[in-house]
Image (tube, rainbow, N blue to C red):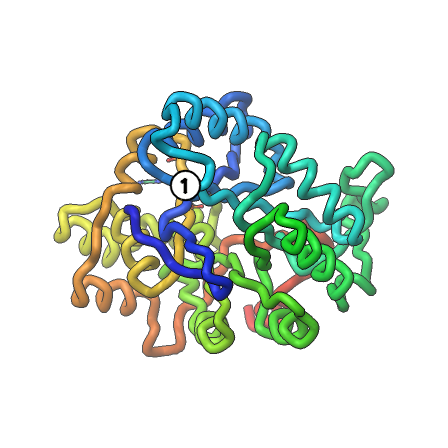
Amino acid sequence: TGRTFTLNNGVKIPALGFGTFASEGNPGETYRAAKCALDTGYRHLDCAWFYQNEDEVGDAIRDFLKEQNGKVKREDLFICTKVWNHLHEPDEVEWSLKDSLKKLKLDYIDLFLIHWPIAAERTEDHQVKLGPDGKYIIKKELTLDPTPTWRALESLQDRGLTRAIGVSNFTIPHLQQLLSIARIPPTVNQIEIHPFLPQLELLEFCKKHNILPVAYSPLGSQNQVPTTGERVSENPKLLELAKKSGKTLAQVLISWGIGRGYPVLPKSSNPQRIKSNFEDYVMGEAEMKAVDEVAQLEKGGRKDRFVNMKDTFGWDVWPEEAKEG
Ligand code: A2P
């Protein structure tokens, strides 16, 4: 799809982005997937320092632009990357973006995000430093007050190294705190959104404050095993709807997200699925409603989160959910 949304600073963001996180991490897999996505027509790539594959994404961008010979230019692409938890100290934020730029072989990116609202210790050579329990060593002060980190992102935008800045995995309290100190307010909050986690409260808060939500795992994170036992991809109502519409389930989920008003970031390493996910499909109102019902919007929305790094980090971003469940 060629649709776009506009960030609160006027920068346009393509509604369909391509996720580059490779769960298997086989060498060459990210290159092939990113190159295939660009060749298919995706113009928005979602990257991260943490994914350890920005060099392959950069090779794909370089080769694609070269083959295009000026038909598609760097400025036609929208590239997002993120700073990982152990690089939240201001100097490290800058080091992180410069390291990403080097690997991506770019001189600026379009969007730079704080990956998680958690600051952790690092080693001398910019790697994550783990504690004796094998978990991250949390930097409490910088986690509870990310002002220095945000100031570093603001400075990177001032200097033209990124066209926009934002956050990921932030809750409403995190966003409230950030908005209270920000000179440049965040443009986006990239979060998990799909019919099992429609995120009603957070979406409403974002809308009110002019922050664009961006959906990761829009297909329901099909490679993760949900705690509820049910996979989004196995939901009978969704499967029936897809069949009736003559579309794939992924096309239904992508269309539902964009129809709700935010960019979505499906990922795939399969060329056929990369292509079919890009197909332009605008769902009708009745189909939107049918997915809304699966998401239980009238009851406040389902709350089945698939992605939580608390066991890795030793820190839970959503402690209230743990108490409930
Ligand atoms: P694959 O790479 O084999 O296509 P999410 O973006 O929600 O995290 O989901 C990503 C997962 O969904 C990947 O494992 C990917 O596997 C799978 N996937 C992506 N597109 C489709 C599709 N059109 N149909 C089925 N599975 C898909």
Q: Position of 111 compared to 276: left or right?
A: right
- Going by the numbered disc 1, the residue's amino acid type is Asp
Residue 165, image quadrant: bottom right
Q: Position of 245 compared to 262: left or right?
A: left
Rendering coords of residue 245 (x, y %): 14, 52
Rendering coords of residue 13 (x, y %): 42, 53
Structural crowding at the residue carrying mark 1, measured as other residues with C-alpha within 10 Å and reported as few (<14), some (14–19) or many (≥20):
few
Q: Residue at left 45%, top 70%?
A: 203
Q: Is residue 18 visible?
A: no
Q: Which residue is mark 1?
A: 76
Q: Residue at left 46%, top 52%?
A: 216
Q: Is residue 172 visible?
A: yes
State the SS at label 1.
Answer: helix
Q: Position of 273 compared to 107: left or right?
A: left
Residue 52, image quadrant: top right
Rendering coords of residue 253 (x, y %): 31, 53
- The quadrant of the rendered image in which ligand 1 is seen is top left
Rendering coords of residue 319 (x, y %): 64, 68
